[in-house]
Amino acid sequence: MVPPTLVDYDSACRHWSWETERASLAGLPLGRGLNIAHEAVDRHVTDGHGDRLAFVFLSRSAARRAITYSQLAALSNRVAGALVRLGVQPGDRVFTLMDRRLELYITALGTLKAGATYSALFSSFGPEPIRARLEIGKARVLVTTPSLYFRKVKSIRDALPRLEQVILVTDPVSGEPHNELPDHALSFASIIEAAPESFEIPPTDPQSPALLHFTSGTTGTPKGALHVHEAAVVHRATGHLALDLRPEDVYWCTADPGWVTGISYGLVAPLIVGATAIVDREDFEAERWYDILSSEAVNVWYTAPTAIRMLRRSGPGPAGKRHFPQLRHIASVGEPLDPESVRWGIETFGLPVHDTWWQTETGGIMIANFRATDNVPGSMGRPFPGIEAAVVRRRGRSLEIVDASEQAGELALRSGWPSMFRTYVGAPSRYRECFADGWYLSGDLVRRDENGCYWFVGRVDDAIQSAGHLVGPFEVERVMMEHPAVADVVAFGKPDPIAYEIVAACVVLKTGYEAVDTVRLELLAHGRRRLGPAVAPREITFLPELPKTPSGKTLRRLLRHSDS
Ligand code: WT7
């Protein structure tokens, strides 16, 4: 049995130094700074590991495709060169809207090499969430596919004057022609073919922007959390010590890169460690997932409670048919991990599932159950070494630290860890509101037990947690209000045994509309069309009026627990 990477948790906490961690990164040659893409790719080639596999792409429609670190270096260099030729400069923002395919990953790395900021849009988003994020993020370049462009971008393009270039990844499999590109779009294949295989990364300040991830709050527009190149320090340390990753490992993070987990731990952390990352292009399917774990000989698997509950629902049969001798560590993130799911890991693989806690804003894992520490089912674990956590109450502009074994309070982290977000783009006051007395306030309610383990209690606000994603009720409500039948609407998370919560809505109809199934179906379809399936309400209930507080705020909590 391979020993855990983190053997003595207490000693690691006592001796932790982020400076020492920084020193374990290579840095750009000649002291020219720190660039995530160099740490993730080029460094390994320089160190003589260019022939190791960086990625293995799996899909039903194409053959398994393995990419070495050398190939990844050359491809991301070409993207970087092509972007620079298009006039992309440090500080510019390059977005992708596509499914889990090679072009997404080389665009992310190429963007970072060019010194620009990368942001991934979830490919299931509908036009409105896409428009809002491209606008808030002041996107200059969007890389997408023709089919996504026609379905989701064309209708909003005129509303995005800052979006200068659309680059289309034409899919040879679907036979989409190269030469009929719409609306002055460029062909991804042509521009990277024309760019050289080598590229010199410009000097990169570790504090300069690198990654932009969107997240949702209860109110207002989506928030764009901006991260800097120095975040790589946390990605490497947590990948190695919390996920137990080593260079020789095959690793599978099941999160989509449209969410922070899919970038921090589906791209950056495994590559910095030098491991091989599996990327499956297909949607969840129990048999397929067990097959991948077994046939790809996955050593470390990072997934989400919703996926685990879906696997559990499919029964023990599919797992029982296969063997997983290489599997060494299983971890999950995104929502509360129920003790039954931890035990399911032991029954199915002989390994408990290790819960980890973090957020878009924290950039990396902050609290974890480690391989070498007790894994208390139901608890999120202990703070990562170097992270100072506390349970607090907000008292006006200052904080009171509470005795967490007695009562729940808000989880706070001492500000200053390397992957901490540096702002919400375009919303500096919302950023400032996240901090008090030198602490970052997470918005999550927790308890801490006498062993120092943290237990999730709930959200301070009412953001919906569905299938590991945070959905902002306001974003849903705004789109539902567009429909002519809707007089008032409230969106909320309805408890769900699989997805933890599903997006549900209560609608008050305008006079002249009847509360009948045809109207309900039409509203559900409107939601899906405008918001996409990950964000749209799955259930709609008609009410004569919404329960409100005296100040006019809808009482979401009441709805959440009603049987509607
Ligand atoms: C929110 C952050 C960071 C990865 C994916 C989501 C919830 C996260 C846990 C956990 C209970 C969790 C919190 C957090 N959350 N991990 N282990 N147990 N809840 O990132 O979209 O920024 O969501 O997800 O409420 O604040 P995100």
Image (tube, rainbow, N blue to C red):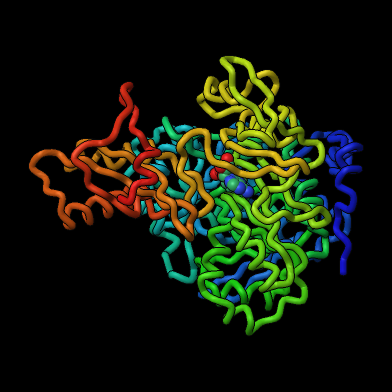
Please provide percent x and percent y for residue 40.
75, 50
Name the outermost residue toward the bottom. 321
Q: Is residue 74 visible?
A: no
**Which residue is pictured at 84% across the width and 60% down the height?**
49
Name the outermost residue toward the left. 512
Q: Is residue 21 visible?
A: yes
Tell which of 301 and 377 is nearer to you: 377
Tell which of 75 and 418 is nearer to you: 418
Quadrant of the displayed image that contains ligand 1:
top right
**Which residue is pictured at 40% across the width and 33% down the height?**
161
Tell which of 418 and 54 is nearer to you: 418
- Say above or below: 275 vs 453: below
> Is 486 situated left or right of 5 in this image?
left
Name the outermost residue toward the front. 406
Please provide percent x and percent y for residue 168.
47, 54
Tally of numbered discs: 0
Please provide percent x and percent y for residue 391.
67, 31
**Which residue is pictured at 66% across the width and 21% down the height?**
400
> Is 314 situated left or right of 547 in this image?
right
- Say above or below: 316 vs 341: below
The quarter of the displayed image where residue 297 is located: bottom right
The quarter of the displayed image where residue 247 is located: bottom right
**Which residue is pictured at 61% across the width and 32% down the height?**
409
The quarter of the image holding the N terminus is bottom right
